[in-house]
Amino acid sequence: MFDLETTGVNPRTDRIVTAFVGELNLAGELTHSREWLVNPGIDIPERASEVHGISTDKARAEGMDSKEAVHQISSLLGRLFGAGVPVAAFNAAYDFTLLAHEVDRHGLAPLDPTLVIDPLVIDKQVDRYRKGKRTLGVVASHYGATLDDWHAASADAIAAGHIAQAIGRAHQDVRVPAHQLHELQKTWAREQAESFADYMRKSRDPDFKAESGWPVRDR
């Protein structure tokens, strides 16, 4: 499982403040984990601090150097992918796109996220006509997954893992090898983006263009 809390909502320009990478066993129990508090090198906007609870002063005083943290995060994820371990991340395109830009900014070796499980993309595919929002909290509640500490990287990541496991139990069609599911999600994410763009062009903005690319947005 993987989650970031950051300085804002733009994955191309914002920076990592906290990160979590962990592993669940089949019973949904946390077996391994690593957390990072990062000094992003810029001020953390008050609005972002209100979301994740990390102030600029705290990040500067206690946070790891950004380049070292990004290197450690990317390296750990790379080892997991290399070992064939799938990584769950809710709305994965945000986290992996932001990480990719952080890696580029620091001149580090690129990460190839090859075994990603995105419960948001999968949920939209297997239950596409369910009404209501698809935020992490709403989707977690729908699948009976616990979310104890909203907008903490650890809690959000663990919830993503539990949701992924719950979807697998509920929907036989997604019980396929991880590499196959990864490729299916590329197609589903593209179709979902195209459907949303079509809706927006018809109802709000005739010039609307959806972002493409999953689990890393196209440049």
Image: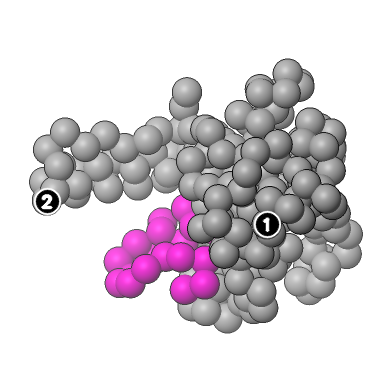
Pick the residue in front: 72 or 170.
Answer: 72
Say which quarter of the image contains residue 155: bottom right
Amino acid bearing label 2: Ser
148 part of magenta stretch: no
Q: Residue at image x 47%, y 53%?
A: 121
User: Can residue 160 be seen in this snapshot?
Assistant: no
- Extreme residue toward the right, this view: 32
Q: CA distance from mark 1 to mark 2?
A: 39 Å
Residue 191 picture location, percent across and down: 34, 42
- Which mark is on residue 203? 2
Q: Quadrant of the N terminus?
A: bottom right
Residue 181 picture location, percent across and down: 58, 46
Q: Residue at image x 84%, y 52%?
A: 62
133 part of magenta stretch: yes
Tell me the residue that label 1 is attached to. 55
> Crowding at label 1, few (<14), some or many (≥20) Cα neighbours within 10 Å?
some
Pick the residue in front: 141 or 164.
Answer: 141
Pick the residue in front: 33 or 184.
Answer: 33
Q: Is residue 150 above or below residue 121?
A: below
Secondary element type, mark 1: loop
Q: Is residue 48 above or below residue 186?
A: below
Q: Residue at image x 42%, y 65%?
A: 134
Left or right of 175 in this view: 204: left
Left or right of 109 in this view: 139: left
Residue 194 picture location, percent across and down: 29, 40
Tell me the magenta residue range. Answer: 115-138
Left or right of 145 in this view: 211: left
Amino acid bearing label 1: Ser
Secondary element type, mark 2: helix
